[in-house]
Image (cartoon, grey):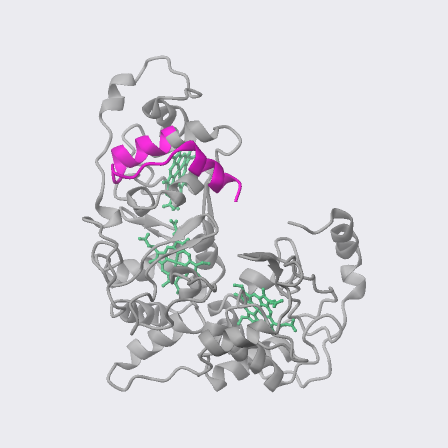
Amino acid sequence: MRLSLLGLGVTLLLAPLLAHPAPALDPAPPELLKRGEYLARAADCAACHTAPGGRPFSGGLPLATPLGDVYASNITPDPRTGIGNYSYDDFARALREGVAKGGMHLYPAMPYTAYAKITDEDMQALYAYFLRGGVDAVAQANHDSDIPWPLNMRWPLALWNLAFHEDQTYQANPKQSEAWNRGAYLVQGPAHCGTCHTPRGLAFQEKALDEKDSDFLAGAALGGWYAFNITADTHSGIGGWSDAELVQYLKTGRVAGKAQAAGPMAEAVQHSFQYLSDADLQAMATYLRSVKAVSDGERKARFAWGEPADEVVSLRGQDFDPQTRDDGARLFLGNCASCHAWSGDGVKDGYYPMLSHNTTVGAQQPDNLVQVVLNGVKRKTGEQEVFMPGFAGSLDDQQIATLVNYLTNQFGNPAVKVDSARVAAIRQP
Ligand code: HEC
Ligand code: HEC
Ligand code: HEC
């Protein structure tokens, strides 16, 4: 967070006084607002445009790019600081072409490359939601990017768009079913799965925008996390998941004996996917199965690794030091076993998950496991709340490396190792 505390405090104090009434556009009919709200959720506009503790859609959240932080704008209908003066065409242009009212090119941290696929009908519903009665106006000035001059000049973004951006709404594939097309539309367009799961090239461009290309959804590093390969490959992707498991994961973030969502995926599930209809989630699962399989050379699926620990049973009842530096089993017993059990099998009907048969522990990239140990897990769907505390404050880099190497060896893929330098890099991005 780069916001000055004073500035933040003043903004928070003044925010209620500065709120403007929505401008004089006709309020939209309730069904249209409802549809717009559903789409805004599916597209997770709030993920970037609502800062933690901030008013909905009033902006301010910093997003890391290779050149420096970029701040999401105020997209409430406030005419001065928000998008209250946007016509429908201005709005559609910002979402599809990445050009704000007045002609300023937006950084592709705003996923217009995916939103370009949004149909006119859905775009109208989104416009109605944001400008005709779904969102309260909030006066909050936008924050300039931290990208230094001359890199902050925006005209090169026009060239970037020429090279990498395809401004075309979703074109249905007549050879596929209605459900497949619905799933493809959601995955490629509003739900923008590729923003996180598709690898990016040197110019920050997603290497593929649909299933016809073999980089699409093939897995990508994401600010110290790894958004897994979710192509149809049986070992490296999600080919070994059933449709029902995919739907359950998107709806709740957990599939016992397989995977739990943490970090950015937990946020996407909590703020977006849990609200999608079962039919839409099922349609996405149908489509994902047809995404060209990409193998990363794994011999086994991420979720297929691991055995319950038995050697630790011999340590039961002994005195041991949970702050040891070089003994992974003891670190596990001292810090993790109280919830995940001595065996690592978890307890309480899966509330505390098994650590074997767990994609985070069985993955080829140990980053997410390091993140989970550092920062824990927090996720709320419906009435269900899951919480695992983080250990960033109680375990140092060497201890976490030792522990993670124990976990991958015991419960995951034994070939995967981390050292303390990697843990330090993930701790301090
Ligand atoms: C992954 C993050 C992210 C998501 C998701 C996202 N945006 Fe943005 N958006 C941004 C960023 C960052 C900017 C500012 C970019 C810049 O300064 O160049 C922005 C800018 C905008 C602008 C330009 C406003 C202006 O005049 O400055 C509009 C309009 C907008 N977003 C609407 C939306 C809508 C509607 C959604 C959901 C359908 C959405 N955004 C989802 C990150 C995001
Ligand atoms: C904001 C970034 C982001 C977005 C958007 C996103 N994901 Fe993810 N996804 C991740 C990360 C990071 C993980 C790894 C989570 C973990 O290890 O707990 C993940 C994990 C998954 C997994 C579990 C894979 C496994 O083997 O454990 C599935 C399935 C998945 N995502 C599907 C999707 C689909 C489908 C969409 C779009 C509807 C989507 N994701 C959108 C970041 C994202
Ligand atoms: C206070 C109880 C508690 C403790 C202590 C605890 N966990 Fe967890 N752990 C949880 C809960 C709850 C979840 C989330 C389950 C879910 O997502 O549905 C979880 C999830 C996980 C996951 C799966 C995350 C993912 O993204 O797939 C891993 C791996 C994990 N814990 C490892 C550990 C390790 C290693 C330790 C010790 C350093 C530890 N846990 C300590 C409660 C705990």
Viewer-proximal residue, 16 or 30? 16
Q: Point out residue 105 in the picture as x, y percentages from the top left corner.
A: 60, 74
Q: Point out residue 112 in the picture as x, y percentages from the top left corner.
A: 51, 73
> Is 75 placed above or below 378 here?
below
Q: Is residue 206 left or right of residue 296?
A: right
Q: Point out residue 234 in the picture as x, y percentages from the top left corner.
A: 20, 57
> What residue is rendered at 38% in x and 61% in y?
199
Q: Point out residue 168 in the picture as x, y percentages from the top left corner.
A: 44, 83
Q: Is residue 325 left or right of residue 429?
A: left
> Is 188 placed above or below 351 here?
below
Viewer-proximal residue, 50 or 290? 290
- Where is ligand 1, by quadrant? bottom right
Q: Quadrant of residue 19?
A: bottom right
Task: Assess whether residue 426 is covered by the magenta stretch.
Answer: yes
Q: Quadrant of residue 95?
A: bottom right
Viewer-proximal residue, 99 or 280? 99
Viewer-proximal residue, 192 or 50? 192
Q: Quadrant of residue 192?
A: bottom left
The residues colored magenta run: 402-429
> What residue is rendered at 48% in x and 69% in y?
43
Q: Is residue 155 left or right of residue 138?
A: left
> Is 173 placed above or below 369 here?
below
Task: Assess whether residue 159 is covered by the magenta stretch.
Answer: no
> Is 87 placed above or below 161 here?
below
